[in-house]
Image (cartoon, helix red, strand yellow):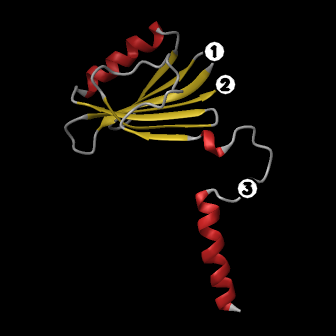
Amino acid sequence: MIKKLYLIVFIISPLVLSGCLPKIGGGEKKAEADQFVQGSVVPSFPQTVPLYKDAKTVESFESMDSWGASFVTEEDLNKVVEFYGTSLPALGWEADLKKNASYFTYNIKNEQYVGTIVINKASDGKRTAILASLTTR
């Protein structure tokens, strides 16, 4: 009995985790449309989000009506915060800045999207990390 249960778990689990089983429910977009890219921004990433000059893209994704991307730059954290403080409103975004203990978060929205931009020190303590996430309204 236990051997059969293990067999079922070991056969079914990888299929479920890899997305090989059909979806249950009526999702309009198929999982094949999901994208995850390392080293560049997915082509569908909303063009109205300002990207910091010379920042290197770590990874990005698109899934259904959501996008995310992470970047690193050699620039000082305060310069990056200032850049987004002026660039977001200039591109039509409402941006509410919140300073936390060691990082900054812009809660952003416009007519099409809502999201956040988090600006923090990178794990190496030298560079600045930027994380952008958006969903359609």
| Mark 3 surroundings within 10 Å by alpha-carbon count, few (fewer than 14), some (14 through 19), many (20 or more) | few
| Residue 48 x/y as whole percent | 50, 16
Few, some or many C-alpha atoms within 10 Å of disc 2 (few <14, some 14-19, many ≥20)?
few
Residue 92 lies, in percent from the top left, at 52, 9
For mark 1, what is the residue?
A: 111
**Quadrant, the C terminus:** top right
Q: Pointers 2 and 1 in contact (CB under 8 A)? A: yes
User: Residue type at mark 2?
Assistant: Arg
Residue at 62 percent across and 43 percent down: it is 32
Could you tell me the amino acid type at mark 1?
Answer: Glu
Q: Secondary structure at mark 1?
A: loop
Q: Residues within 10 Å of mark 1 (few under 14, many from 20)?
A: few
Mark 1 or mark 2, which is nearer the start of the sequence? Answer: 1
Tell me where residue 25 appears, x and y as whole percent. 80, 49
Indicate the quadrant where residue 134 lies: top right
Residue 137 is tagged as 2
Q: Which residue is mark 3?
A: 22
- Disc 2 secondary structure class: loop
Residue type at numbered disc 3 = Pro
Cα distance in 3D space between marks 3 and 1: 34 Å
Residue drawn at 77 percent across, 54 percent down: 24
SS for dot 3: loop
Which of marks 1 and 3 precedes in the sequence?
3
